[in-house]
Amino acid sequence: MDEKPRDPRGLPRRTAARTARLAALPLGYAGRSALGLGKRLGGRTAEQVSAEVQQRTAEQVFRTLGQLKGGAMKFGQMLSVLEAALPEESMAGYRAELTRLQDAAPPMPTAEVRRVLDEELGGAGIAWREHLVSFDGGPTAAASIGQVHRGRWRDDPADPTTERDVAVKVQYPGAGDAIASDLRQLGRLARTLAPILPGIDVRALVAELQDRMAEELDYRLEAEAQRAFAAAYRDDERYVVPDVVAGTEKVLVSEWLESTGSLATVIASGTPEERDHYGQLLVRFLFDGPERTGMLHADPHPGNFRTIPGPDGEPGRLGVLDFGAVARLPEGGLPEAMGRLLRVAGQSDLDGLEAGLRAEGFIRDKVRIDPQLLLTFLGPFVEPTLVEEFTFTREWMREQYDRLSDPRDPVAAVGLRLNLPPSYLLIHRTWLAGVGVLSQLGATAPFRAILSESLPGFAAD
């Protein structure tokens, strides 16, 4: 039986209501398209009508996914990372709205926030009202699963000198149920959402979210990962990871990270220097983190990375947030075979590449693949490693995507014959998402040198 919905500014919980709003997305698109046909018959050009339909659809998509939060907004945030690969004519009307999903969402009421703090921190025996000596009732950030408030935490309630600024992340009530409902509905709507989201495999994105959302809902796991990263990067010259102050399953209190914005801000209006600087820091962190912690930060979403300028306003350190999605690597770091196979591919060693991929389980025993087509298929991963510096652009990303998704191209068929071992699933997704963000930034990076420093097996013996 459905629970009663809470305040409409919070996370809507009634399954039927959420399902109806998601189901309305393709219906709304169909209605606008029909209206657009009438306008074309009335003399408007196809380009004018298409742009108007795309823009209004984008507004509806953002409004629905953002307001529902939960799995709906998480899905939207994944789209925002992938948009660099999609056709310009299809995405022009969507880009601004999807980018907004990287940094914003409507808030839940303050009374609801305090209720969660009572249940979680109070229930864990933490007298949070004594420690949290000031608390901003309005959120400073809001996302798919929870929202963040700024406050002052006193470690020793009797000693004012132990105060520090903190970020209090509070999970939306009913987030787990809402996420499960959203993802089921989005999976059912995969085919009808295709015209709205051209080129996106909705079913595959939904399946991936379903596989990892259980871990993200438990802030205790996030706190454990964040503590490890904070210890590994303490006093680092390039990165800042806030320390964990307190936490339960649905509340996480961390030290406050002062910044001027996120990578979404740099994507929207950053200078060339900022784009290159922070893009390089992002790449280095994704490959360096596993070596230091044995874990991969598996959510390179622009909103999770914050810019911290130097004393004169120059590009400075990169702050890293949100450790809810991490890959705990069995080998204590990225697989040595990953770097070795990338190097072999860069050397065009067809026999060595095929043998190595078979040994790692990417090609099953009875599957036969043309080695040259295989090498061409891996081009998007290999190409940035062949030069001293590589510039990632939307145009390059789009070209790779078009080539690998064209059913008429024999190279595209290679992907259907490959197998992705479970141990590489989050690594593969993080690599693709990271390249997507670099392409949005338009960053130039010494990619080969970075891999030589931090990716096991890549540097020549």
Image: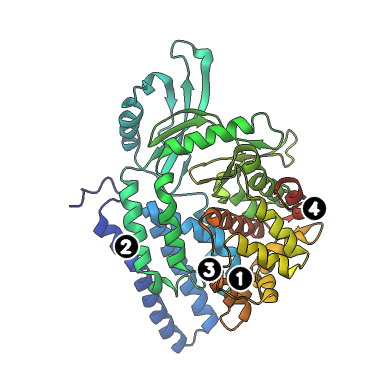
- Tell me the residue at 56%/33% (across/down): 228
The residue carrying mark 3 is 93
Q: Which dot marks residue 92? A: none
Does residue 429 appear left or right of residue 454 in this picture?
left
- Closest to the observer, 350 or 175: 350
Q: Quarter of the image holding residue 39?
A: bottom left
| Disc 2 residue type (three-letter) | Arg
Report, in whole angstroms, how far the alpha carbon at label 2 lies from the one at label 4: 54 Å
The residue carrying mark 2 is 21
Nearer the N terminus, badge 2 or badge 1?
2
Report, in whole angstroms, how far the alpha carbon at label 3 lies from the one at label 2: 21 Å
Q: Residue 301 in the image: state x and y as whole percent.
A: 55, 51
- Closest to the observer, 11 or 382: 382
Furthest-left residue in this view: 1
Mark 3 vs mark 2, foreground winner is 2
The residue carrying mark 1 is 401
| Disc 3 residue type (three-letter) | Gly
User: Mark 4–mark 3 contact, CB under 8 Å?
Assistant: no
- SS state under label 4: loop
- SS state under label 3: loop
- Closest to the observer, 314 or 16: 16
Mark 1 vs mark 3, foreground winner is 1
Q: In this view, does 235 lie above or below 35?
A: above
Q: Which dot marks residue 460? A: 4
Mark 2 vs mark 1, foreground winner is 1
Q: Residue 317 in the image: state x and y as whole percent.
A: 68, 38
Q: Quarter of the image holding residue 409?
A: bottom right
Q: How crowded is mark 1: few (under 14 residues within 10 Å), some or many (20 or more)?
A: some
